[in-house]
């Protein structure tokens, strides 16, 4: 088997993973931009998302 075929077998999956992550980030950014436009207050949206990420007061863990 030629060496370029082996190289392609190694590089192709790595490239696909990178492409999938790039597309995912692009879609996530578009969704965030759409939500900010829909709410009309991007700062409030960002604050709400950060509040969801924080643990609830009195929650163990």
Image (cartoon, grey):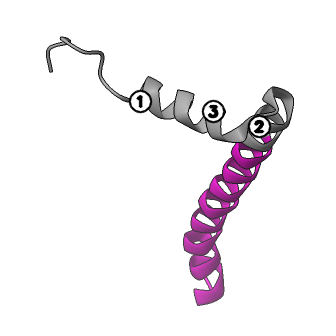
Q: Position of residue 43 (x, y in %)?
A: 64, 40
Instruction: Tell me, yes or no, whether the highlighted magenta stretch contains residue 7.
Output: yes
- In percent of width and height, residue 29 lies at 72, 48
Circle on res. 36? 2
The magenta stretch is 1-30
Q: Are marks 1 and 2 in contact (CB under 8 Å)?
A: no
- Of residues 48 and 7, the one nearer the viewer is 48
Q: Which residue is mark 3?
A: 44
| Left or right: 28 as drawn, with respect to 7 | right
Q: Quadrant of the C terminus?
A: top left
Q: Is residue 16 above or below residue 43?
A: below
On the picture, is 44 further left or further right than 38? left
Nearer mark to the viewer, of 3 and 1: 3
Query: Hey, which quadrant is residue 60 in on the image?
Result: top left
Which residue is located at x 68 percent, y 59 percent?
Answer: 22
Q: Residue furthest left?
A: 60
Residue furthest out toward the bottom: 3
Closest to the camera, between mark 2 and mark 3, is 3
Instruction: Please tell me the numbered disc located at residue 53.
Output: 1
Q: CA distance from mark 3 to mark 1?
A: 14 Å
Q: CA distance from mark 1 to mark 2?
A: 18 Å
């Amino acid at each position: 088997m030629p060496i370029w075929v082996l190289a392609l077998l190694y590089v192709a999956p790595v490239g696909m993973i990178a492409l999938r992550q790039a597309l995912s980030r692009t879609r996530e950014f578009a969704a965030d931009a759409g939500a900010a436009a829909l709410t009309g207050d991007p700062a409030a949206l960002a604050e709400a998302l950060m509040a969801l990420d924080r643990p609830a007061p009195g929650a163990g863990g």
